């Protein structure tokens, strides 16, 4: 085995200056870097140990802290904001980056549009590529870009852009754009590093690129080397290198990105030289030496691992074994909607459970979920024994209830235990987190059942008490219509319902509640009465300021004759609308000079008549009217009939009493219906659900066992 090191590898001048400056100033000042000083997590951790923190923007900088502008630079607006706020800062922007910013500014002054070859998300590019700049990362991006034939363009490149690709794209653009000013702004050190890496990778069997995948410079080196050497590996440090990828007679080349600290490069050279020396001096075969360095694995083992890479479907980990470990998404978490790329990152350490030593393709299948479950089962069992609430997230809606993930374990929540009231649509709970009580815990049968019925009742009572304490008559509150009934609408005020009676929906008469409101409507209502003892809140949708009864006595003085329209009949008289929202009553005895049995003997709905105002009760919204008196004053004389005999008059009085009693009975019935609607009841659907819970629980239990007999949790 022979090891070769590229001459130009590791820190470039700009990065070295930024790091050295930060280390030098860290002892005297409290430093924070705006973004990672260098795209290398190993170095970032070392800087953090020396007191150099990281902020994402100027707003996070605290009093007494000095900001460090990294070698990538920052947009001019950030530097201006630092000055405006009087925040001290150290500018470590790379000289080559500053030159690009100057060229971009000059192009703007000359009226030239800017084209940048690079990654728009890269912090360096963000510093000088404004929103109008065209950013191209590869040849395919050219087809998606729009070029105006009447516009002049200036072309620059990110300092770490691949040199060969720069010239290829520049030629294509030159043929597309009539006036294109081209500036090769790739850093000289970067160009040398890329050229040396290309030359070295062409004459070795294995190429190792040291650096963090966060670094664009490191990624470009990897892409260049891989073109000439298929066995190219990118690793943060030599410790992460899989030795099984090496052979005894390999020629090995090593290079490093501009963000890779010298310590990592030196460690790699020393380590690889030691291995190369051992292959010469040791009588063992190279394979035997590697096998000694590896641990032995068996199904059921619990081992410590280091994350190598993460994709949306799986996590690859280093087990210290001759093969990598694979954690599928299903073995990372029970939450099918979870994004595992947000759960772990390369470099994280995990304890994992070995499922299979060989999956048929040389990989080791391991599980994080299985190991977590062993710990989490204890927490759930303790919550069950202590009858204490435990937090979980609802992930699925299934037949008969919900599936929640509690500490990584799948738990069934029967629909009858979801809430303290009947819930028609369980989908509203999906994706939400709640506290649960563990109702059943049978580990051998993998049976865990949870519920929150009692907790929901407690939560509702707490919300009710808080709401009643905060409300007062006349207060305007916001709510959502939760259900519609014949006599009104219930409004959810935040876990507690208040009632808008049908008579409080509008100043005009409302026949059907659904003509005004629908379930789900957002409303602004006025509190008109609060009764904590009966848990009742009366609400009004009416706008007090537009109350048509305000000043009614001035608009309709007693004794005045006015016109109105007959809108409805009753056995005791006729209701007449004087204006929108104001109805008066013409009693049957005040309709005509003669005795009549029914109002429709003289009047009809829709008829416009003249009436005299005989009484106004503004507080109770009542106006008494007389058509008979109005007719007399206006000289309209009908033909009076002889007075009814005593028996007829008596029968009329009895009939009126019956009508009054009937109206009173109707009012009691309506109040009773309203009272019944506000009581908490359990519908037949909820009773049926509880009967089905046991069958559903057994149906959803996953009865698969692993190869070694370990159990899947429910």
Image: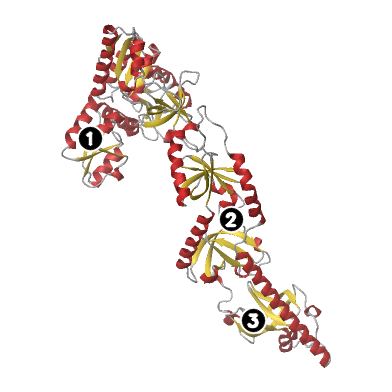
Q: Which type of secondary structure does the marked residue at label 1 adopt? A: strand
Q: CA distance from mark 1 to mark 2?
A: 56 Å
Q: Which residue is mark 2?
A: 520
Viewer-proximal residue, 154 or 521?
A: 521
Q: In the picture shown, does residue 3 fall above or below 498?
A: above
**Mark in the foreground, 2 or 3:** 2
Q: CA distance from mark 1 to mark 3?
A: 82 Å
Q: CA distance from mark 2 to mark 3?
A: 37 Å
Are the two marked residues, 2 and 3, in contact with CB atoms closer than 8 angstroms?
no
Residue 625 percent coordinates (x, y): 68, 83
Q: Is residue 343 left or right of residue 524?
A: left
How many residues crowd mark 2 within 10 Å: few (<14), some (14–19), many (20+)? some
**Mark in the foreground, 1 or 2:** 2
Question: Which corner quadrant holds the N terminus?
Answer: top left
Residue 412 percent coordinates (x, y): 55, 44
Q: Which residue is mark 3?
A: 623
Q: Which type of secondary structure does the marked residue at label 2 adopt? A: loop
Q: Earlier in the sequence, mark 1 or mark 2?
A: 1
The residue that appears at 27% across and 41% down in the rendered structure is 80
Residue 294 percent coordinates (x, y): 36, 19
């Amino acid at each position: 085995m022979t090891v070769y090191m590229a001459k130009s590898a590791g820190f470039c001048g700009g990065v070295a200056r930024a790091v050295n400056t930060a280390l030098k100033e860290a002892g005297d000042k409290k430093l924070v870097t705006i973004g990672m000083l260098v795209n290398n997590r190993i170095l970032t951790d070392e800087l953090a140990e020396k007191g150099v923190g990281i902020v994402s923007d100027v707003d996070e900088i605290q009093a007494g802290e000095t900001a460090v502008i990294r070698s990538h630079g920052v947009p001019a607006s950030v530097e201006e904001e630092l000055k405006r706020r009087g925040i001290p800062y150290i500018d470590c922007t790379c000289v080559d980056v500053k030159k690009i910013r100057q060229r971009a500014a000059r192009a703007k002054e000359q009226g030239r549009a800017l084209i940048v070859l690079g990654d728009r998300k890269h912090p360096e590019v963000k510093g000088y590529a404004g929103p109008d700049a065209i950013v191209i990362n590869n040849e395919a991006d050219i087809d998606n870009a729009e070029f105006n034939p009447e516009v002049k363009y200036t072309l620059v490149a990110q300092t770490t852009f691949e040199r060969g690709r720069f010239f290829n794209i520049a030629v294509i653009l030159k043929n597309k754009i009539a006036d294109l000013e081209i500036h090769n702004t790739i850093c000289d050190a970067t160009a040398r590093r890329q050229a040396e890496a290309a030359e070295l990778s062409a004459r070795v069997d294995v190429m190792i690129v040291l650096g963090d995948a966060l670094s664009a410079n490191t990624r470009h080196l990897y892409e260049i080397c891989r073109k000439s050497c298929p066995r190219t590996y990118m690793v943060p440090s030599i410790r992460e290198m899989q030795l099984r990828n090496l052979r005894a007679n390999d020629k090995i080349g090593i290079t490093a990105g501009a963000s890779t600290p010298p310590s990592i490069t030196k460690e790699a050279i020393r380590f690889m030289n030691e291995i190369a020396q051992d292959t010469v001096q040791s009588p063992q075969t190279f394979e035997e030496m590697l096998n000694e360095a590896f641990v032995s694995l068996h199904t059921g083992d619990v081992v410590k691992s280091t994350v190598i890479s993460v994709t949306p479907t799986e996590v690859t980990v280093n087990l210290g074994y001759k093969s990598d470990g694979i954690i599928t998404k299903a073995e990372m978490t029970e939450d099918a909607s979870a994004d595992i790329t947000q759960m772990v990152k390369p470099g994280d350490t995990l304890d994992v459970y070995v499922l299979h030593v060989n999956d048929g393709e040389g990989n080791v299948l391991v599980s994080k979920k299985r190991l977590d479950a062993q710990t989490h089962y204890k927490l759930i069992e303790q919550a069950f024994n202590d009858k204490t609430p435990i937090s979980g997230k609802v992930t699925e809606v299934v037949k008969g209830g919900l599936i929640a993930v509690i500490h990584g374990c799948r738990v069934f929540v029967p629909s009858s235990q979801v809430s303290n009231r009947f819930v028609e649509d369980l989908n509203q709970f999906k994706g939400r987190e709640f506290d649960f009580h563990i109702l059943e815990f049978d580990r051998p049968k993998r049976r865990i059942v949870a519920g929150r019925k009692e907790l929901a009742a407690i939560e509702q009572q707490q919300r009710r008490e808080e709401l009643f304490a905060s409300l007062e008559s006349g207060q305007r509150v916001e709510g959502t219509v939760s259900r519609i009934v014949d006599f009104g609408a219930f409004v959810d005020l935040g876990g507690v319902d208040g009632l808008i009676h049908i008579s409080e929906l509008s100043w005009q008469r409302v026949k059907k509640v659904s003509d005004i409101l629908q379930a789900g409507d957002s409303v602004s209502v006025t509190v008109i009465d609060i009764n904590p003892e009966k848990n009742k809140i009366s609400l009004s949708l009416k706008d007090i300021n537009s109350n048509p009864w305000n000043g009614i006595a001035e608009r309709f003085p007693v004794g005045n004759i006015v016109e109105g329209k007959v809108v409805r009949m009753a056995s005791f008289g006729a209701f007449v609308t004087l204006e929108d929202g104001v109805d008066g009553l013409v009693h049957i005895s005040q309709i005509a000079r003669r005795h009549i049995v029914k109002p429709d003997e003289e009047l009809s709905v829709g008829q416009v008549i003249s009436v005299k105002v005989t009484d106004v009760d503004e507080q109770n919204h009542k106006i008494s009217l007389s058509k008979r008196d109005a007719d007399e004053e206006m000289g309209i004389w009908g033909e009076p009939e002889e007075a009814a005999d005593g028996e007829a008059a008596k029968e009329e009085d009895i009939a009126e009493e019956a009508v009054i009693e009937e109206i009173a009975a109707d009012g009691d019935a309506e109040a009773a219906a309203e009272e019944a609607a506000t009581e908490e009841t359990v519908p037949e659907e909820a009773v049926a659900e509880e009967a089905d819970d046991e069958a559903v629980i057994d149906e959803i239990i996953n009865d698969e066992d692993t190869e070694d007999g370990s159990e899947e949790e429910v």
